[in-house]
Image: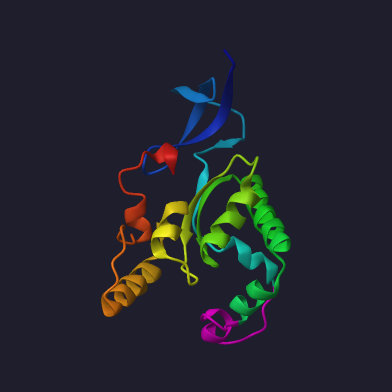
Amino acid sequence: MQSFVLEGKLLLGREFELSEGSVVIKNGVIDEIVQAQSERPALILPSLFNAHTHVADGVLKDPPHSTLDELVKPPDGLKHRILRETPREQKVEHMRLAAIQMLASGCTGFADFREEGVDGIAQLDQSLRGLAIKAVKLGRPDGDDVDELLDVCDGLGVLDAVITEQRCSASGQQHAKVPEPCCASMQGRKTTEI
């Protein structure tokens, strides 16, 4: 059994109340939290979760000053043109670097709105291989069958779900699963799964 103790300033409870003490960890699980005076300056807090990312956007670090529509509106906003023109492996590399930067700053999970449909999700999966970070993958349809996309991701972004539902209703199409807004796609999961 592997165990160790972290000592310092603690952020505890739902309100992150500042306290002092130690956290006992056994086999990778918090076993005990002891509140006691501590002279150590270390701050011990839960890991962070970035709730809204577009990790592939790292291929476009410094966009020119433009309107929001000119930058990101599909299908021909600058972001979408750059994503189409950037080689797949370069996008995967940028996504991996973004995940490594999140880990280095204490973030152990993120929710990503992944453009490029099924292949965009596959790129994200490839970029995260071997990294100890949890991704909630929110697909964005790119001409894909919605059911196929939902088979490989955790849900759709709220706007994407609404647009997809409207398109299906207007065309009379049915799909096996109703697209879920991002919050609903995580409903009922344990926090350790997120």
Identify the residue at image location x=28%, y=80%: 170
**Residue 17, can we see it?**
no
Which residue is more in the foreground, 128 or 107? 128
Query: Is residue 103 within the magenta segment?
Result: no
Q: Main secondary structure of the magenta part?
A: loop
**Residue 187, can we see it?**
yes
Q: Is residue 116 above or below residue 71?
A: above
- x then y, percent, for residue 70: 57, 86
- x then y, percent, for residue 114: 53, 63
Q: Which residue reaches farthest top?
A: 1
Which residue is more in the foreground, 153 or 186? 153
Q: Please give the range of residues in magenta.
A: 62-77
Which residue is more in the foreground, 78 or 62? 78
| Left or right: where 110 falls relative to 42 | left
| Left or right: where 92 falls relative to 53 | right
| Left or right: where 7 falls relative to 63 | left
Q: Quadrant of the C terminus?
A: top left
Identify the residue at image location x=67%, y=49%: 100
Q: Quadrant of the N terminus?
A: top right
Which color scheme does this rendered protein use?
rainbow
Q: Is residue 121 above or below residue 168?
A: above
Marker count (numbered): 0
- x then y, percent, for residue 118: 52, 60
Identify the residue at image location x=50%, y=71%: 142
- x then y, percent, for residue 69: 52, 85
Q: Is residue 72 above or below residue 54?
A: below
Residue 56 placement: quadrant = bottom right
Query: Is residue 66 within the magenta segment?
Result: yes
